[in-house]
Structures are given as C-alpha cells and as structure tokens.
Image (spheres, rainbow, N blue to C red):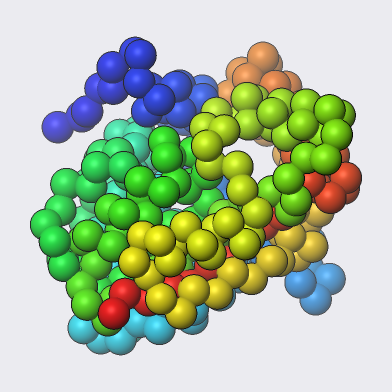
Amino acid sequence: MKIIWDESSHEHKVTKFYAHGVENYVDFHGGYLNFGFWENGNEDYLVAAETLVKKLGVMLKLDDQAELLDVACGMGGQDIVLANHFPVRKITAYDLMFEHLVHAKRRIDQAGLQDKIKTVQGTAIKLPFGENEFSHILCIEGIVHFNTRNQFFKECHRVLKPNGRVVFSDYVAKKMPTNPYEAFLLKLVTKLWNIPYDNVGTPEDYKANLEKAGFTDVVVHCVGENVIPGYCKEQNREECIQELVKIRGWFAGRVGHIIDHVLDWSYQKGLIDYVLVEANKK
C-alpha cells in the first residue's frame, strides 16, 4: 500500500524534490542515483556507480547468513548488484518513495531475485521493524536528507542485531563556515537540496554522533576527490543534461543542473566532502 506523506512533512518535501519525471527514468543511468566512485581514469557513469556499490559491499563484510536493510534504496539497482556479487541471505530494500520502489520491484523481478529481495516503503527516522532484526544496514547518500541524521543513527542501532554492522556513504561539511560568504554558500546548498541544517557537520562530528548513538569502531573515510568531480563532470555532459530535461521536464531539469553547479562550487571551495563510513554494534 502506498504511503502518502502529509504535505507539511519533511518527507513530503523530499518526495516532491525527487518526484519530477520519476516515472520516465526507466533505465537512464542504469537506474542508479548515486554519485559513483571515479577511479583509474574511468569516465563511464555505470562503471562508477557499480564501483561505489561494490566498495560499500566489501565494507559491509556480508556473509551467507546476512540480513541486510538497504535504506534509501532508490530504484533497486544497488540491491541487485549486492545480491549477485556478495553472499547475503535476505535484502530489504527500503525507500521513502513508492515510485522508486515500483522501478525497484520491476528490476528485482526481471533479475529473478524476488525471493531474496523485498521492497518496503517508509521513513528512515521511524523504521517499521523490530529490535535486533538485521545483521547489516546500508545507506547510500540518502542520509543527508533525513530529519534528522542522528535520529536515523538511533533507529539503526535499535533494529541492528548485536555484532551487527552499518556502512554509509554520505555528504559532510569539510569544515564549518568561517565567514559570512561560506555560511551563505553552505546554507544555499542545504536549502536547494532539502537538507535539514541540523545535519550539517564535519567528519569529526559524524564519528562522534555515531558513537553517541551507541556504535563502536567508527571509521569515516573522506573520498570526495573520487566522487564529486567525476559526478559533476558527468552531469555537465550536454547529452546528460538533455536526457534529464526529457525525463524531469525543462524547469526541473535545469534547476537540477544549477544545484549540481552549486554543489561542485562548494566542493571546490573546500566546504563539503563525501565520506564512506563504517561502524559496528557490540
């Protein structure tokens, strides 16, 4: 059953932000929404997107008894990669948007993985699962939108089994603003991208907040140089711009292009970074 978020909710705002043309995505960019991990001179988005997923899969340390919760699963491509390349018993693909899950379900069925991967709609700050239900939790990039990130950390700790493991990719402030110009730029990024300002923090803040939520062995890897420039270059290709305008409409497509420019600008100014994060629950 489709959940329709209250119009006053943060979930509704995020859904509206990503909903433009979602029914038209089909197989654009292979259905991936992540920024990719760009290395060894690669300029192919699909290669970069799958490289990121596989790197996170390795960090998860999955085994054949793993019960994985993938929060903000998008259109399901990443879960198919994980199911096909890593030992895992069950994957719950969880997303805020019903429309994303329609695409995910189609891909899962086409891959013949419906017995291994199931889809569930809901909000990340109130997971509809019991305590100690999953052995592993993954979230690729969605966390920055959650209201709030720290509430999501608490929910992860609740539904994760003892000795369980979380792995995230996320965006952080490389440093906190030191002047009005930097403060304006950072607030502009959060406003354009529907990010709660409470989620703004440095890698050091990220580690401290995970530890406060009860996690141990927290490691935050800053890898922005392998992510943000490559993604922005891809998004700036004229063919990519035109395709996104077809999918999302002229206005939403062009606004998305502007947001990408602001993001790239913020990275070049040393204000934001991209992190891969791993932590355990004792």
Q: Which residue occupies the foreground of this view, 111 or 67?
A: 67
Residue 94 appears in the rendering: yes
Image coords of residue 144 (percent x, y): 52, 44
Relative side of 192 to 114, left or right: right
Q: Residue 82: name its quadrant.
A: bottom left
The quarter of the image holding the C terminus is: bottom left
Residue occupying image coordinates x 24% and y 42%? 126
Q: Is residue 55 above or below residue 225?
A: below
Image coords of residue 139 (percent x, y): 43, 57
Q: Which residue occupies the foreground of this view, 272 or 198?
A: 198
Residue 83 appears in the rendering: no
Residue occupying image coordinates x 79% and y 62%? 225
Relative side of 114 to 95, left or right: left
Image coords of residue 168 (percent x, y): 48, 62
Q: Is residue 227 above or below residue 62?
A: above
Q: Residue 176: name its quadrant.
A: top right
Residue occupying image coordinates x 52% and y 37%? 198
Residue at the extreme left of the image, as rendered: 130
Residue occupying image coordinates x 22% and y 28%? 3
Relative side of 273 to 159, left or right: right
